[in-house]
Image (cartoon, rainbow, N blue to C red):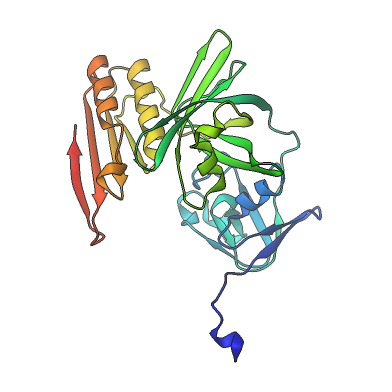
Amino acid sequence: MRSIFQPWRPASFSVRLQDGTAFPVQPNETMLEAALRAGLRAPHSCRVGACTTCRCRIVSGSAKSLTDRAYVLPPRDIEEGTFLACQTLPASDLVVDWEMQREAQPEHAATLVGLRQLTPRVWRVSIAVNAVFQALPGQYINLMMEPAPGSPMVRPFSLVSVVETRGRTVLEMDVARRADGCASSWLTSDAATGAGVRIQGPFGDCVAREELAPLIAVGAGSGIGAALGVLLYSHRRWPTRLTALLAYGGQTQDIYGLDEVSDSAGTAGVPHLSRAWVEKSTAAATDIAIG
């Protein structure tokens, strides 16, 4: 009887590759997240199910896709069991045909050099790399850190800005502090400033490109920063391209960056629209700002 009244807990599963390599997948963790946590060189780029870099084929077992695969995969591939690892939750133990990368991603030593609070929950963190680090706003890096002795962690963060000066590159990223987040709490504390870290990347293709169509960037929470960075970069490079920023937050105080991007557009002479929505307690959304 006791088992009937115990709270239900999501199950953990095992994924085994066809070469015999196996790794555990924690509850509510995607296959890609689990593979990277296990130290495997899993191919990936966008992490949102758009680029298909992490495509794999499930040989046995069942899985749940977080997105509709038909948007990016041909029907035949879906019929043959092809999934996107970044959007796949195992529903049982799996055997997967998924080829890992042979060469490790290069790593760079870096130092946490700056911290600035933007909202009650979001901080902008600056990282200095003593090398030329070629990346663009909107891409992301894997940040390897050790908030507590003996507790190494790897977390992905999107880039807001990349500034190279005299062979030294300063990267900026926005971090949302979470009450139960060891990594985010450490990164957004003064104690982290001056600490050494390592970075991998950059990854991802969500960047500004030279096109005639208007550029619309969408962000929520700390993701507003990456959207903002993409637009600021576009203003500098292609000042004739129309831009728009769509931002979303749980409260009015969660919205930031609208004035900055509007000022940038004004300086560059770019027609620009900023619009933000805030969620009400009724779960409706209200339009709070236009710039």
Residue 50 image point, x, y percent: 49, 44
Q: Identify the residue at the far front of this view.
A: 191
Image-based side of 264 in relation to 16, left or right: left
4 or 117: nearer the viewer: 117
Which quadrant is home to the N terminus? Answer: bottom right
114 or 36: nearer the viewer: 114
Query: Looking at the rendering, which quadrant does residue 167 occupy?
Result: top right
Residue 165 image point, x, y percent: 52, 10
Image-based side of 240 in relation to 124, left or right: left
Rendered view: 16 above or below 42 = below
Rendered view: 194 above or below 149 = above
Residue 162 image point, x, y percent: 48, 21
Image-based side of 139 in relation to 120, left or right: right
**Number of marks drawn:** 0
* Residue displayed at 52% across by 56% down: 75
Rendered view: 152 above or below 214 = below
* Residue displayed at 60% across by 85% down: 3
Q: Does residue 140 show up?
A: no
Q: Identify the residue at the far right of this view.
A: 20
Residue 133 image point, x, y percent: 58, 20
Rendered view: 14 above or below 53 = below
Q: Identify the residue at the far bottom of this view.
A: 1
Image-based side of 22 in relation to 71, left or right: right
Q: Does residue 110 show up?
A: yes
Query: Looking at the rendering, which quadrant does residue 121 occupy?
Result: top left
104 or 143: nearer the viewer: 143
Which quadrant is home to the C terminus? Answer: top left
